[in-house]
Amino acid sequence: QLAEANAAEQASQMEMDPELEARASLTAGIVTAVVSSFINGLTFVLQKKGILRSRHRGMSQMIIGQIGNFFAYNMAPAVIVTPLGALGVLFGAVLASWILEERLNIVGKLGCVLCCCGSVLLIVHAPKAEATSILELEERLLDPVFATYLLFVLLLLLTLIVWVAPAHGHTNIMVYITICSLFGNFTVPSSKGLGLLAPEALGGGSSSSRALTLFLFLLMILTVSVLSQFFFINKALQHFSSNIFEAIYYVMFTSCVILSSALLFKECTTLTVSDGLTMLCALTTVCVGVVLLRISQEVWKEKEDQKKTE
């Protein structure tokens, strides 16, 4: 009987270990995403303050933040990591009001509260991060639904870049926002895929050559998508306000990333109906908070510009 009891206890511990590992990975991903958002928000404020006058220093800070996001995407579902990027806007606004003495009006404060409340709800009701094998990743990349979606995105990007952007990009803010957001369909899934493939591709296992080929393919896609996003974001900021651009871009980019990740990694399949509805409401709350926060900053900026001209 004692032996049977010990065996039952060991079996229960083995069943609990994967669950504990999943929780630890989710927690680590959330913490990494929050820290990365803080770094991104701090970088923006320091650049405006003039502390990071050199572009290279500012870019190095942004690279650190993006590396943090890369690890976060591989430890937690994209459906929670991507919306937490709103905390970068929140941290930036709070630090700007303290360091740059930018006034945060009642609308901006309401936006901060909404960002915090929505982020907490997302964390509480987040789906569990499920491990995916290399074979499953290959099968999901070739899934007809996901392949059809990517083909549609590529055709839409080609149309926008070749025909629409040259004619209307400098007058319609949605052109560059749509282009940058659509590239997010490739950025985040590639990041998660690279994190999954790295141990096998660089470890020299039996299937390392096959994994290495797929690893390099995803790395190329990630590089092209990130550089393309930076290029079109810079073009957009030459014609439009950064506050308005970032508010709309955040909403569209988050929506595209969650959709592509849901199709590829099936992250939302483990959610109950109540958790799914709660996360949808939380995401909407965060998006509204970001928009309100950016609008309040834009209003403050316009008032300051009017004072300088008077």
Image: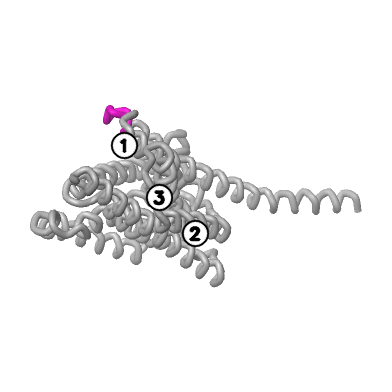
The residue tagged 2 is: 118
Dot 3 amino acid type:
Leu
As drawn, the residue found furthest toward the left would be 167
The residue tagged 1 is: 48
User: Residue at coordinates 42% horizontally, 57% vertically from top-left?
Assistant: 106
Which residues, given as a range, are shown in magenta? 52-59
Quadrant of the rendered image containing residue 179 = bottom left
- Secondary element at image label 1: helix
Of mark 1 and mark 3, the one earlier in the sequence is 1
Check contact, mark 3 vs mark 2: CB within 8 A.
Answer: no
The residue tagged 3 is: 104
Which label sits in the foreground, 1 or 2? 1
Quadrant of the rendered image containing residue 284 = bottom left
Of mark 3 and mark 2, the one earlier in the sequence is 3
Residue 193 appears left or right of 224:
right
Q: Is residue 257 visible?
A: no
Which label sits in the foreground, 1 or 3? 3
Q: Is residue 55 visible?
A: yes
Prevailing secondary structure of the magenta residues: helix
